[in-house]
Image (cartoon, rainbow, N blue to C red):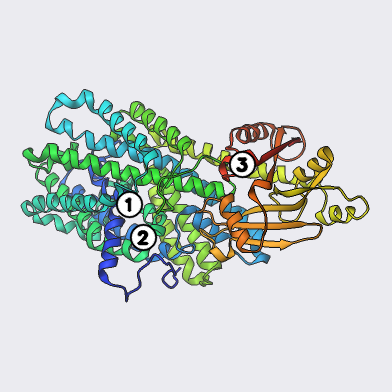
Amino acid sequence: MSASSPANPAVPEASEPYKRVATMALGALGIVYGDIGTSPLYALRECFTGEHGVAATHENVLGVLSLIFWALIVVVSVKYLVFVMRADNRGEGGILALMALAMQRKRGEEVKVRPVVITLGIFGAALLYGDGLITPAISVLSAVEGLSVATPFFVPYIQPLTIIILVGLFLIQRHGTAGIGAIFGPFMLVWFLTLAVLGVKEMVTYPAVVWALSPMQAVRFFMANHWHGFLVLGGVFLVVTGGEALYADMGHFGWRPIKWAWFTVVLPALMLNYMGQGALLLRDPSAASNPFFKMAPEWSLYPLVALATVATVIASQALISGVFSITQQAIQLGYSPRLEVVHTSAEERGQIYLPGINLVMLAGVIVLVLGFKSSTNLASAYGIAVTSTMGITTGLAYVVARERWNVSRAVALPIAGVFALVDVSFFGANVVKIAAGGWFPLLLAVLVFTLMTTWKRGRDILASRLRSTTMPLKDLLESFGNHPPVRVPGTAIFMTGSSEGTPPALLHNLKHNKVLHEQVMLLTIASEDVPHVQADDRVEVIKLEEGFVRVIARYGFMENPSIPDILKRGREKGLQFNLMGTSFFLGRETLIPSKRPGMAMWREGLFAWMSRNARSATAYFRIPPNRVVELGAQVEL
């Protein structure tokens, strides 16, 4: 399950100056490693004080530290950095990009595996929405809880302070992070250095803690604790929950800077801090209630809480941006209705803001904080979604290795099997948390999965119904020979989802208005299974008979279609029209659930509701609103 290093334009080559790699690695610290970098706030604590925690004895401390170290090595260093990140979709990573890459199959083999690939990819994406809600809640809450270590006075104010911080975080999303994003990397570098310094300070007092690096300590831990020891893996997994972000954010920085940042800064800082917490527990087992903040000298506690709070806000920002990005991908791939997408930066195309999703996430995060009340309770809800996503990533990466890279089964299966064994072990340890809170991300994932698949299936059924009521374009053009319609000056642009048939709106216009413009443009916007489409391949112009022109505009799943951009590129391909003399004709279907074969009635009703609430095509595609004519029709699903 290996391949050559990904051909990614964002990845600096070996010949490029090290300064450029270092600069990009510094940026990766702020975007990629925020989640995994704030895990020391709660991960080790949950192994000893969580629902399935073990006593902080000498052997248990060394055993848990050994599990943490080897989890970081196997899951992050080997699985993601060595193998999974090589499966880039033209430089982009993430579960949907991996799904799209896995679907780029030979035509004769597509039907056999595509349904399985799609199901895995969409459910994996749905699981990330739960992660996007829980991460801000547990991260900020765990940071603010540090105040209770200083004095019990702050205990009643922990939840209100957390909610105030989170509300502020979501409110600033509309302004984008392009301005403050430049300081994320340097700040997180300070955070990781702080982690390392705190850890070294404690390790000096108990150097024997380094014995935890031996895998035999983990083996002895399992032999001594049996089933209970296995359940502790649910707490150990919290140290790698940010691993999926390495792959998801690959398009921003490339494989090499992310790898450099991990091995030179992040991994050493994390392990030094975890070792320091372990050394503290070996000296004082009672510190297990909050070992991270109890490592700090008393004079530094309040500054450390402030530092940790900002670090968790940065980590939360990365997850929020990730949810925005995956929603945009879902829209382009046809698994989500059109939503308002606001570009907050003219320079960075990845800087987007979705007001509707932002509001829903804010409400969800507040409900989590108020419902679970503490980071310890939230830890029970954390993990199950991420373990499932990591398992799906392993499966999809195996498909890519076999079908795209032609790696033999004898090589790919054992490697994927080892990773799958690790994924299944972590999943099994987290399954027992379902009743204590793990049900929340699973329920949310099922809800999002249902919405995505209903929308996709509904659009397919709607397209089929519309095709059955229209006629081939060739037949329409031939009919003009015997009964030519009245032609009027100007250009008419009919948007259609099919690049072959006749748009229903065109037939309705002929039926009711009995006229046709001198130039008729049939515009189809197609979404490709790649993140970005080359500028030269964006627009294809096909001249037809009777003044008809077919225009096919292609966009990747990381891009937003724009009618002004399409028309500009169309002019470059020879199209001639006056925008002030151009009318855009759009179909507006009223959907009626029926008992016709297709979907269950409740899903048809859900699809109709989603369609009514989708953003209008005029606004989404940036069509001049004063040039739009909508023609309605009723369609039975």
Residue 531 makes an appearance in the image = yes
* Image x and y of residue 67, in percent: 27, 53
Q: Nearer the viewer, residue 437 or 193?
A: 193
Q: Which mark is in front, 1 or 3? A: 3
Question: Residue 512 vs residue 320: left or right?
Answer: right
| Kind of residue at disc 2 | Phe
Residue 430 picture quarter: top left
Element type at mark 3: helix
Q: CA distance from mark 1 to mark 3?
A: 33 Å
Label 2 or label 3, whichever lies nearer to me, is 3
Q: Secondary structure at mark 1?
A: helix
Against 534, residue 168 (above or below) is: above
Whether 522 is drawn above or below 504: the answer is below
Q: Are marks 2 and 1 in contact (CB under 8 Å)?
A: yes
Amino acid bearing label 1: Ile
Crowd rating for badge 3 (residues with CA inside 10 Å; few <14, some 14–19, many 20+): some
Q: Which residue appears farthest toward the bottom when viewing the image?
A: 15
Q: For the point 42% across and 51% down, which residue is it? A: 346
Q: Residues within 10 Å of mark 2 (few under 14, many from 20)?
A: many
- Which residue ends up furthest to the right in the rendered image? 482
Where does label 1 land, which residue? 31
Q: Residue at x 33, y 58 (%)?
A: 76
Residue type at numbered disc 3: Ala
Which residue lies under the disc numbered 2? 253
